[in-house]
Amino acid sequence: MPVRRLMQLIIAALAAALVLSGCSGGSAPSVVVGEAKRGGSVTVAEVNAFSSLNPYSANGNTDINSKIGAITHSGFFYLDDSSRVVRNDKFGRFEKVSDQPLKVKYTVNEGVKWSDGAPIGAADLLLSWAAGSGYFDDIDPAKETGTKYFSVASDTTGLAGTLFPELGSDGRSITIEYAAPYADWEVAFDVGLPAHVVAAKTGLNDEEDLVKLLEDTPRGNADKPAPHPALKKVSDFWNTGFDTKTVPDDPALYLSSGPYIIRDIVPEVSMKLVRNRDYVWGPEPWLDEINVRFTGSVPAAVDALRSGQADIISPQPSAATDNLLTGLSAQGITVERFKQSGYDHLDLSFTGTFADKDVREAFLKTVPRQAIVDAVVGSQATDSKPLDSQVFLPGQPKYDETVKNNGSSDYAKVDIDGAKKLLKNATPSVRILYNRDNPNRAKAFNLIRDSAALAGFRVTDGGQGSADWAAALSRGGYDASLSGWIGTEAGVSRVPQIFRTGAGSNFTGYSNGDADKIMEQLAVTTDLGKQDELLAEIDKHIWEDAYGLPLYQTPGTTAFTSRVAGVKTSPGPLGVWWNVAQWRLS
């Protein structure tokens, strides 16, 4: 589910067997540079299975897809482990041209290119803007008319209020003009997928044709929707054409603009990436090769680390498996514990069974949140309690005050009798979607199913496998879902990304006009204190509407052997991958 721009909240889970790829990928011999070795390879064990080369789409926006995307793509900036914006001047520059109106110019440096040799330029920037802005959408959800073109995972609030960009005569720049001030302008835009590939795959002659198509297509108008078949073909390919569990036959589909290039994938098992030898527009990586093994099993990940089959692991420990990580330091293994900037949650679909608010409230009253926390988090965190906010995490300045007033106390304890009264002898069926290969989600599902049955709910198992379940979120066919968001603390568009009517990561169909207006105000508010006040108001609306329940802030663990140095964990969606260029052999 569901890394996304800004908070880039990402769906956690997805698991597979821990087996090395049998294919070889050449790597240059290691050479000594100072006291460290230039070259060599490391192996990382990751929880989730890879499923898409487009981590920016609603379908492809999972944590592992975003991690691989981060090291195979480059851009104007990145976020460090403290969610600070670090500009990449070797790639290009972006500058605010004016405040009234807000104009920002983006320019890619000469010589920056895709791994097929094609230069990165204005067409790539324009395609990224088209996908991230929702500019061409003319859909009216209430009337069920019109078309939503690019299914981007991030919030489109800011870029949707921009004019059609001005392309520079140098072929490497565009200028974006906002209709209103935008608080998150600095992290609102970056390069995405190669325009020349999208053009070729959708029947256009070249990227110039794609630019012309975008220039000739008018802004979408929900009051007067009009079909644009050529644009629809482009957006459909952007949405799903890069989804894959294997290395595509056509190398154009997995081009890199970052420090590494995908060499091999064994579906739901492993992945190999090799150094992009042409990459000079960002921090130079030390390693020649990175291998990834997919496993949702904590014991398997720990065994791989101990045996030397993995150098770095980032498992999802539970109360039952946390003891496996103890004692690793005695073997020269570094173990880092932290709280992720994310949380697990239960969301209800606002159609079918849960279209009735009384039924939503009844179901939420049966959810044994403390039992879930005890089973999953246990002693990994002191004072382990359920999370009581949809927009704040414990420790953030506004959390405690917001929790007192947002209505979360109505679901502090399981209330079977209260649920029965709301149901009035009805026995609704509820199908819950979740990643069945994730032990923590499976535990939560079982606890919810058994408790809900006491009130008369008939809960069915809608769990899907590791590499498939995330894409099912946008397809529907379920009544509730168990997932997790992981994000940064940069900006505030993480909230409208999920809760705004029609937003890219709004998989529930949730819609509240008053909350939408507050989110519009949030987008133009730069004062941090005022932002917190608006977020608290939104949180209250979400609880009042019986949207769903946050379960717990996710605990994070990273462990790595003494063989590798330079590893530093971020609590955000990229975890250890945010500074992959600094990884090196000790």
Image (cartoon, helix red, strand yellow):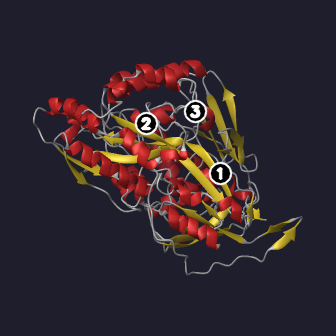
Identify residue for label 2.
386
Q: Which amino acid does label 1 sit on?
A: Glu
- View extreme (right): residue: 34
- Horizontal and vertical percent position of residue 560: 67, 61
Assess whether mark 3 and mark 2 are in contact (beta carbons under 8 angstroms). Answer: no
Q: In this view, does 445 lie to the left or right of 29?
A: left
Identify residue for label 1.
336
Image point (73%, 50%), residue name: 109
Q: Is residue 189 left or right of residue 38?
A: left
Is disc 2 surrounded by few (<14), some (14 to 19) or many (20+) residues within 10 Å?
many
Label 3: element kind: loop
> Mark 2 or mark 1: which comes first in sequence?
1
Please say whether residue 165 is visible from this viewpoint.
yes
Q: Is residue 486 left or right of residue 37?
A: left
Label 2: element kind: loop
Q: Which amino acid does label 3 sit on?
A: Gly
Label 1: element kind: strand
Q: What residue type is labelled 2?
A: Pro
Separation of disc 2 and disc 3 at Cα?
25 Å
Q: Which of 233 and 55 is in front in this view?
A: 55
Residue depth check, mark 2 versus mark 3: number of the one nearer the observer: 2
Identify residue for label 3.
491
Residue depth check, mark 1 versus mark 3: number of the one nearer the observer: 1
Separation of disc 2 and disc 1 at Cα?
23 Å
- Horizontal and vertical percent position of residue 449: 26, 48
Assess whether mark 1 and mark 2 are in contact (beta carbons under 8 angstroms). Answer: no
Q: Nearer the viewer, residue 135 or 561?
A: 561
Separation of disc 1 and disc 3 at Cα?
26 Å
Q: Nearer the viewer, residue 73 or 92?
A: 73
- Horizontal and vertical percent position of residue 514: 36, 21
